[in-house]
Image: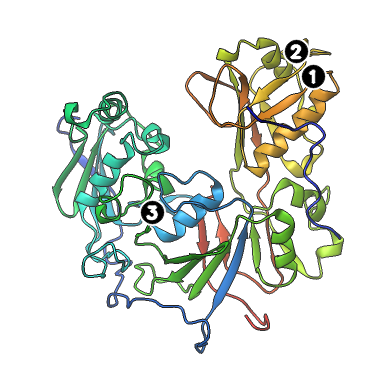
């Protein structure tokens, strides 16, 4: 198995130079956002035919966007793109509080175990070839049910299934899908706690109270899409179709191209076209940004922070005249887990004996919470140990900082070439069955943008992005 050694391989600097109970209505915005307007016309981009007042922006993402399937998206970059294309039943406002999205109202039973959600009747999916007519149809309650059934499928990752295990019957459905490999032998065709009494109502019955249930419905993994977009293919969605403010046009080289949904139910002013560049090196991404080909870099990586942000968390003096730095109040956390199956308890005890200053170079990089205290170990008896593979630049930075510390104690941290958790793996940056959380890193969230650019908002969670116009006096843009 090929191993990638972290120690001494720090990345080069990138910036050269139940039961019946009384229900209580808790929210209703009927008529507040009427979503008037005719169904959108099919959009076609004609680069050679400029349109008056046509506004296009280009954003840069440090992580590659390889999927717009809500259930396959992993990175913050992918979840942000999903959030632009799809809506969920619930949304979040600029302060991170839950608000209606596809829902127009909801009610909660007195025992907090039954959520009755009523849908807007004016929401249509984006036009797409997944529909026979090519025109997007109206959203129905059955679509929501199918999306949750797909969450429990063995054919998709478990992220959403883990999130919604409190729905009555969900775990049983997911377990059967997971362990009964022959579809003909499965007996569960539905999730007991889901009800669709009519086309405009969906009911969730929970097995226990979950104060965060509505917020979970706002997560991109709870996005709603039509069953036509996945019924013909068991894998990831190949043609993303949602109801969001932007719709998918195409993937062109390293750019994801989105266009504005002119019939979006929220009355907001958004750019006509958004290109999101990803999957290129950090240095190339910054060079494009410096050449004004990209207007904003979203969630700049630790390596970019090292060069462009000073020790006080402000933009370095050399960049102030050209760029601006935004620091939204976002919960941006990364974890490190120990695999007890590796039987390398000395590694766990060593890490628990570290201090924040042992790992993070300075305050620019946020803070670390170590889950338990342990006596400091001066040296490790093992010559090397392994961490599961990751491509996330924040997780790589965390592991690299630890590798530097470990190398000074006559040991070596090795990044395995596989994401799988085996006995060889002592550490991982993603949770898994039997994982023990060692530490949590509250990492900084910075947006680096052109001085003349505004309109990007990220609130509370790194995926909760909204884009409005505009660019001002920005030359050709």
Residue occupied by mark 1 = 411
Residue placed most toward the observer, 118 or 374: 374
Disc 2 from disc 3: Cα separation: 52 Å
Dot placed on the residue nearer the N-terminal end, 3 or 1: 3
Position of 68 with respect to 339 (left or right) is: left
User: Callout 2 environment at 10 Å: few (<14), some (14 to 19), or many (20+)?
Assistant: few
Instruction: Tell me the number on the disc at residue 382.
Output: 2
Disc 2 from disc 1: Cα separation: 6 Å
**x and y percent of residue 149 in the render?**
26, 40
- The answer, for residue 373, to whether it is visible in the render is no
Residue occupied by mark 3 = 99
Residue placed most toward the observer, 174 or 383: 383
**At x 25% / y 60%, what residue is drawn?**
120
Name the colour scheme.
rainbow
Total numbered badges shown on the rendered structure: 3
Q: Is residue 189 above or below residue 451?
A: above
Asked whether disc 2 touches disc 3, contact meaning CB atoms under 8 Å apart, the reply is: no
Dot placed on the residue nearer the N-terminal end, 2 or 1: 2
User: Callout 3 environment at 10 Å: few (<14), some (14 to 19), or many (20+)?
Assistant: many
**x and y percent of residue 72 in the render?**
43, 44
Dot placed on the residue nearer the N-terminal end, 2 or 3: 3
SS for callout 2: loop
Asked whether disc 2 touches disc 1, contact meaning CB atoms under 8 Å apart, the reply is: yes
């Amino acid at each position: 198995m090929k191993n990638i050694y972290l120690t001494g391989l720090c990345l080069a600097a990138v910036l050269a130079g139940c039961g019946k109970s009384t229900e209580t209505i808790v929210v209703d915005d009927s008529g507040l956002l009427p979503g008037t307007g005719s169904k959108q016309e099919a959009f076609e981009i004609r680069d050679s035919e400029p349109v008056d007042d046509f506004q296009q922006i280009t954003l840069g993402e440090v992580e590659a966007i390889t999927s717009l399937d809500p259930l396959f998206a992993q990175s913050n970059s992918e979840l942000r793109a999903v959030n632009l294309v799809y809506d969920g039943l619930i949304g979040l406002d600029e302060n991170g509080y839950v608000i209606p999205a596809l829902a127009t109202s909801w009610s909660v039973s007195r025992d907090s175990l039954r959520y009755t959600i009523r849908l807007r009747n004016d929401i249509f999916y984006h036009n797409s070839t997944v529909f026979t007519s090519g025109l997007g149809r109206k959203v129905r309650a059955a679509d929501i049910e199918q999306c949750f059934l797909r969450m429990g499928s063995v054919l998709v990752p478990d992220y959403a299934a883990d999130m919604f295990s409190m729905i009555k019957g969900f775990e049983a459905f997911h377990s059967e899908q997971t362990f009964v490999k022959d579809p003909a032998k499965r007996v569960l065709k539905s999730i007991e706690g889901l009800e669709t009494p009519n086309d405009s109502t969906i009911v969730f019955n929970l097995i226990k109270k979950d104060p965060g249930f509505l917020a979970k419905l706002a997560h991109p993994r709870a996005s709603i899409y039509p069953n036509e977009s996945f019924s013909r293919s068991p894998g990831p969605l190949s043609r993303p179709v949602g109801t969001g403010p932007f719709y998918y046009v195409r993937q062109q080289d390293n750019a994801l191209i989105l266009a504005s949904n002119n019939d979006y139910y929220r009355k907001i002013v958004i750019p006509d076209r958004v290109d999101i560049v990803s999957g290129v090196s950090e240095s190339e991404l910054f060079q494009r940004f410096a050449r004004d080909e990209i207007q904003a870099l979203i969630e700049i990586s630790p390596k970019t922070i090292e060069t462009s942000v000073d020790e006080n968390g402000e933009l370095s003096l050399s960049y102030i005249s050209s760029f601006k730095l935004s620091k939204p109040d976002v919960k941006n956390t990364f974890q490190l887990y120990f695999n007890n199956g590796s039987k390398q308890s000395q590694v766990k005890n060593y890490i628990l004996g570290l201090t924040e200053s042992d790992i993070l170079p300075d305050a620019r990089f946020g803070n670390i919470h170590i889950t338990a205290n342990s006596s400091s170990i001066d040296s490790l008896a093992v010559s090397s140990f392994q961490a599961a593979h990751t491509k996330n630049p924040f997780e790589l930075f965390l592991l690299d900082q630890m590798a530097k510390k470990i190398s000074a104690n006559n040991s070596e941290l090795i990044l395995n070439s596989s994401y799988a958790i085996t006995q060889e793996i002592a550490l991982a940056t993603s949770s898994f069955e039997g994982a023990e959380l060692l530490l949590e890193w509250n990492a900084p969230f910075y947006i680096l943008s052109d001085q003349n650019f505004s309109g990007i908002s990220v609130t509370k969670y790194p995926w909760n992005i909204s884009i409005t116009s505009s660019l001002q006096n920005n030359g050709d843009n």
